Every structure is written in structure tokens, then in C-alpha cells.
């Protein structure tokens, strides 16, 4: 019997009828399921299937609502995609600024009741142990439906992942699961939402592993994959139209083709970084504009309306446009215009406050970039023999990796789209190169970049919340020995003989920090009346109490010292921290986190 089961015995002790009654209450059922999950991975998978099925239903509901809004606003027929229309009247285009007004007012009203930014799945797993707000997740989905439904160039994948992850978090909290299981359920729910949207369970599962959970674990494989499969089956039962192009490419790829696709990966990395930086640039400029915040999406809607009249294919996420344009022969000028129009529409939409993501927009843009790349080489006299469709599919995966992350996620999307293993290998090649370059030159995916702009420092969904507790203020020794920096060496030696301590903090005439004084250096001075400030070090280097462990270790590395003072904003001394102690505490917490992970396995 496990510890979890033993802990339930007192709760259900008593008469048989009383015990049976308690087991039938919601709390009793939750406790029983929790004990089963901790005792057997099979139960974890069973609950994950329920999470996946729920995510599939939520994904289908969001997709239906967004398309219904588009159908009303733009007069779409059954099965017609907004981005596939060839002409947009100015009257219809007014739906974009109108949607901006509705979104702005809804966001303003919501913020008055619930200030702060909703926690997304990556942030939840990295900093909050998988805890998410169900109400905030629903409102994010509502914002996405308004944005996408009104025609803004944003996708619904962020809403799918948010709702699926939020549902997984709610289930995990109801069962009072362990931190590791909560994070797994958040990943399973988000991955299930993506799997349902694309009809691709492997894509959804690897989206969970690479982007939401941040690592692979033996214990997570079964529940995450089971949730993705369940969501895919539910979406098929509900006849949700998969948001991807199904194509077959018969090219026999050679070594030279793989090298060219590697170059395509470099191109996609550069474009991905440019798109992310431009979104941040526009957001910053818009935030400084005068006037009420709720009007900003409407102003963006006016700009998007002009773009949509010029190129209706820039509307919405781009599902219909991708299906129509990838298989159509365009000239280089037309392709360049499509790339510029779609990239501009997505950047403006997000920069002016429309809610959504770049998941499908990056796929669509990548397909155009890949096709343009192959055609441009042929036009330049470099006859590659690569089918432009192959370039489109490889570019689709590579640019999506550059912006969203997850090289295996996008590679499996291509595999489940085409069934072509050669093209899948080419996509993996381009994706890994794009991912490597973005990490080295930029360091963020789109989701973590937006968190960075809010002041967070996380770069993935790895659970780093425990690092936040290892601050200089928590680890420092408060009883730091101090002395005036003007004291003579003789006076210093009397107060601090050799062996009494290694470092003493020097203070200026006002009692503020002046530097650190090595005891051995003072005792080595030949001039006994010389001020100890003559050997003082680190006058301009110290720690703040709120510094986390990684920043602390960076300061130790930069200063090449083994002890630093901890100061407040007025340069008053709070304590001292040694590199050896900080390193030991970091190692202890890292080992504890490792044991928790192994224990969950």
C-alpha cells in the first residue's frame, strides 16, 4: 500500500455505510482518484484522456464561434475560409475597427475587475507549478474569438492551448495533484488543443513536451500522448476542420537539397527574429500614444482594413489563403507582396492589442518564404530541382520553429501533413538550424519574448520557480563585520586579527557602503597608519537583496571574488554573501528538484 493510500484510511474509517457515503462525495471521489494516480500511472493516463477529450471539445467550440462571427461579418458560405476570398468591400472591412472597439471595451471592463495579465501555459509551468485561472483562460479565448472573428491577422492556437491547459490545471487542482503531475496536465491539455486543431496527435504531443512542459520525461509520455489522441478523435467526431494543408511531394531529395534547406533555415531564423522584434517595437510605440487604451485595437483595425482591401489574403490566421496559394503558381513579385502584406498584418494586429498568436501565421508565412526561396534560386540561374511545394513545406516548419519554437513539433506537423519521410528530414534540418540561430542570436521564442518584455526572465517552460526563492536577501549572512574605510591598518588589526574573519565591509563617512576589505591584505601592509581603504576592493560591485541565484553567480563570475556585500537602495549594508555558500545552496535545491522529478517518475 502506498503512502497516499495509507493517508486515506483515517478519512474513510468508520462503519461501512459511513465509509461508502464519504467515498461517494465529490471530495471523497477526488481523494480516491488522487490516491490511484499516485499508486498507478494507468490512472494518470485515464484522467489525461478526460483532459484531452475536454480540450478537444473546447477547441472545436472556439473554432466554431470564430468562424460563425466571420460568417456573419463577412458573409461567408459553408466551408468558406475568410483568408481565401479574392475581394473585400470597404463596407465589410469596417468589421476590423468595429471588432477592435468591442475588444478594447471588453478588455477594459475585464481589467477593472481583474487587473494583471492572465498567466499563459508556459508561465504557469515555469513559475506557478501548473496553476492557472479558469476565468482568465476563458476570457483569453473570448478575446481571441473577437480578434480572429473580426478578421485580425492572428490565430486561434493561443486560445486552444490556453483553454486546454487551463482545463488540465483545473482538473489537477480538483484532484490536488503533485506539482509534477500538475505541470504534466497543463502540458497535456495545451498539446491536446493543438492536436485537435490540426488533426495531428504527434504534433500536439511534441508541442506539449517542447514548449509547454519544457522537457521529456518517461512518466509524461503516456498521459500527454493519450490526451493528444483523445483530442484528435473528439475533433473528428465533432467534424472540426483541421487547420492545415494536406499535400504530397514526390521529390527525391539529395545532399545538395539538404544544404539548400539549411540555408532556408538561416533565412527563416532571420525573418522570425525580425517579426518578433517588430511586434515589440510596434507595441512600445502604440503604448506611448495618447488617448484611452481601449481605442488602440480600433486604430489598428483601421490600418488592417486598408491592408485587407489591398490583399484580402492577409485577413485572419491564413488557413484558406495557405490552402489556395501554396499550390498556385505566383511570380516572385506577387509572392514578395503576399509575404510583406501578411507579415505586416500580423505585426500590426498584435502590436495594436488584438489577442491571438503567431502559430498559424508563422506557418503560412513560412510556406510563402520557402516557396519564394526556391523560385528565387531558379530565377537567379541556380536550378535546384526542388519542387516549390517542398520549399513551402520546409519553410513552413522552419519559420514556425524560429517564432514558436519546438523543432520536433513542426517536423511532425510536416510528417503528419505529407507522410513524406525525406521531406520530414529536410524540415528537421532547416528547423534545427533556425532554432539554433534564434537561440544564439535572440534567445527567446515568441511567448517567452513577450514575457521578457513584461519583466520576466524565463526562456522556457522549465520549472524555475524554486530559483526565485534563492535570493541574496534570503541567503546572506546578516551580521557582517564593518569598519570605517578611514580606519588605520593598526586599528583594523586590533579589531580583526588574522583568522578572525576573511572579509570586512568598509563604510564611508555617512555610514554607507564603501567597499570590501580583505583581512589578509591589511595585515600585509607595511605602513601601519595607512588607511584600510588603500586595499579596499569591489567599491562598485555589490548584490541587491532581490537578486536571484543566476544573477548572483553572474556577479561573482564577473568580479572574480568570493564574497560580496548585500545593499539596499540607499547603499546601506544588509549583510554579506559568499560564493561558496550560494553555490552550495544552488546545488542543494537543484538536487531536490531532481529528486522530485525522479520521484514523480
Image (cartoon, rainbow, N blue to C red):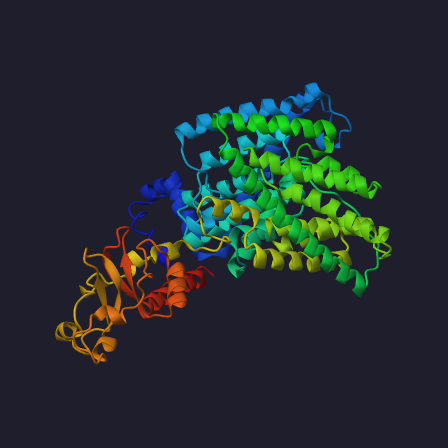
The part of the image, by quadrant, that contains residue 19 is: top left
Query: Can residue 19 be spotted in the picture?
Result: yes
Query: What is the tally of numbered marks visible in this picture?
Result: 0
> For the point 73% across and 33% down, which residue is it?
313
Give coordinates of residue 343: x percent, y percent.
67, 40
Q: Quadrant of residue 258?
A: bottom right
From the viewer's perspective, tell me whether residue 140 is left or right of residue 32: right
Q: Residue furthest top?
A: 91
Of the pair 105 and 591, the residue shown nearer to us: 105
Displayed quadrant of residue 254 = bottom right
- Tell whether 527 sits left or right of 377: left
Residue at 59% of width from left, 50% of height from top? 207
Q: Is residue 153 above or below residue 511?
A: above
Q: Is residue 455 left or right of residue 145?
A: left
Q: Is residue 124 left or right of residue 70?
A: left
Screen quadrant of the N terminus: bottom left
- Is the residue 319 above or below the residue 413 in the image? above
Expressed as whole percent of the image width and height from the top left, the position of residue 405 reads: 60, 52
Q: Nearer the viewer, residue 310 or 405?
A: 310
Residue 81 in view, yes or no: no
Q: Position of residue 466 (x, y in %)?
A: 38, 56
The image shows residue 441, relative to residue 342, as above or below, that is: below
Residue 547 drawn at (x, y percent) = 35, 56
Amino acid at each position: 500500500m502506498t503512502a497516499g493510500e495509507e493517508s486515506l484510511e483515517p478519512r474513510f474509517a468508520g462503519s461501512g455505510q459511513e465509509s461508502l457515503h464519504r467515498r461517494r462525495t465529490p471530495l471523497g471521489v477526488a481523494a480516491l482518484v488522487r490516491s490511484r494516480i499516485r499508486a498507478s500511472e494507468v490512472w494518470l493516463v485515464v484522467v489525461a484522456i478526460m483532459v484531452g477529450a475536454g480540450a478537444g471539445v473546447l477547441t472545436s467550440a472556439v473554432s466554431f464561434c470564430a468562424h460563425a462571427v466571420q460568417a456573419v461579418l463577412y458573409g461567408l458560405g459553408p466551408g468558406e475560409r475568410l483568408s481565401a476570398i479574392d475581394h473585400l468591400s470597404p463596407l465589410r472591412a469596417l468589421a476590423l475597427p468595429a471588432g477592435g472597439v468591442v475588444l478594447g471595451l471588453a478588455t477594459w471592463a475585464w481589467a477593472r475587475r481583474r487587473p494583471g495579465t492572465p498567466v499563459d501555459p508556459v508561465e504557469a509551468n515555469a513559475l506557478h507549478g501548473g496553476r492557472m485561472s479558469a476565468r482568465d483562460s476563458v476570457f483569453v479565448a473570448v478575446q481571441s474569438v473577437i480578434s480572429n472573428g473580426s478578421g485580425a491577422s492572428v490565430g486561434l492556437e493561443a486560445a486552444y492551448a490556453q483553454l486546454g491547459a487551463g482545463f488540465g490545471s483545473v482538473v489537477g487542482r480538483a484532484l490536488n495533484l503533485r506539482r509534477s503531475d500538475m505541470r504534466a496536465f497543463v502540458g497535456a491539455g495545451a498539446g491536446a488543443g493543438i492536436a485537435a486543431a490540426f488533426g495531428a496527435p504527434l504534433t500536439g504531443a511534441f508541442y506539449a513536451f517542447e514548449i509547454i512542459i519544457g522537457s521529456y520525461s518517461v512518466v509524461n509520455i503516456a498521459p500527454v500522448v493519450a490526451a493528444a489522441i483523445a483530442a484528435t478523435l473528439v475533433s473528428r467526431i465533432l467534424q472540426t476542420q483541421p487547420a492545415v494543408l494536406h499535400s504530397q511531394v514526390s521529390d527525391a531529395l539529395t545532399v545538395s537539397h539538404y544544404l539548400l534547406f539549411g540555408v532556408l533555415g538561416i533565412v527563416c531564423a532571420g525573418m522570425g527574429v525580425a517579426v518578433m522584434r517588430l511586434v515589440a517595437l510596434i507595441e512600445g510605440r502604440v503604448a506611448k500614444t495618447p488617448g484611452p487604451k481601449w481605442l488602440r485595437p480600433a486604430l489598428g483595425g483601421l490600418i488592417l482594413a486598408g491592408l485587407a482591401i489591398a490583399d484580402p489574403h492577409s485577413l485572419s490566421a491564413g488557413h484558406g489563403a495557405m490552402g489556395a496559394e501554396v499550390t498556385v503558381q505566383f511570380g516572385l513579385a506577387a509572392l514578395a507582396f503576399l509575404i510583406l502584406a501578411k507579415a505586416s498584418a500580423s505585426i500590426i494586429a498584435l502590436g495594436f492589442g488584438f489577442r491571438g498568436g503567431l502559430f498559424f501565421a508563422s506557418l503560412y508565412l513560412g510556406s510563402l518564404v520557402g516557396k519564394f526561396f526556391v523560385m528565387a534560386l531558379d530565377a537567379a540561374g541556380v536550378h535546384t530541382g526542388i519542387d516549390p511545394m517542398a520549399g513551402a513545406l520546409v519553410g513552413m516548419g522552419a519559420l514556425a520553429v524560429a517564432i514558436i519554437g519546438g523543432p520536433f513539433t513542426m517536423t511532425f506537423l510536416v510528417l503528419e501533413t505529407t507522410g513524406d519521410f525525406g521531406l520530414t528530414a529536410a524540415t528537421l534540418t532547416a528547423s534545427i538550424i533556425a532554432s539554433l540561430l534564434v537561440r544564439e542570436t535572440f534567445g527567446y521564442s515568441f511567448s517567452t519574448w513577450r514575457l521578457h518584455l513584461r519583466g520576466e526572465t524565463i526562456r522556457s517552460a522549465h520549472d524555475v520557480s524554486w530559483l526565485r526563492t534563492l535570493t541574496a536577501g534570503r541567503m546572506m549572512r546578516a551580521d557582517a563585520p564593518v569598519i570605517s574605510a578611514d580606519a588605520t591598518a593598526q586599528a583594523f588589526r586590533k579589531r580583526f586579527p588574522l583568522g578572525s574573519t576573511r572579509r570586512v565591509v568598509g563604510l564611508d563617512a555617512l555610514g554607507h557602503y564603501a567597499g570590501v576589505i580583505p583581512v589578509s591584505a591589511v595585515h600585509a601592509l607595511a605602513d601601519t597608519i595607512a588607511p584600510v581603504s588603500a586595499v579596499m576592493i569591489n567599491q562598485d560591485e555589490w548584490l541587491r537583496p532581490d537578486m536571484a541565484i543566476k544573477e548572483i553567480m553572474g556577479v561573482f563570475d564577473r568580479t572574480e571574488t568570493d564574497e560580496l556585500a548585500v545593499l539596499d537602495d540607499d547603499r546601506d549594508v544588509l549583510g554579506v554573501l559568499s560564493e561558496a555558500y550560494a553555490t552550495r545552496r544552488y546545488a542543494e535545491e537543484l538536487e531536490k528538484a531532481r529528486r522530485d522529478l525522479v520521484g514523480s517518475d
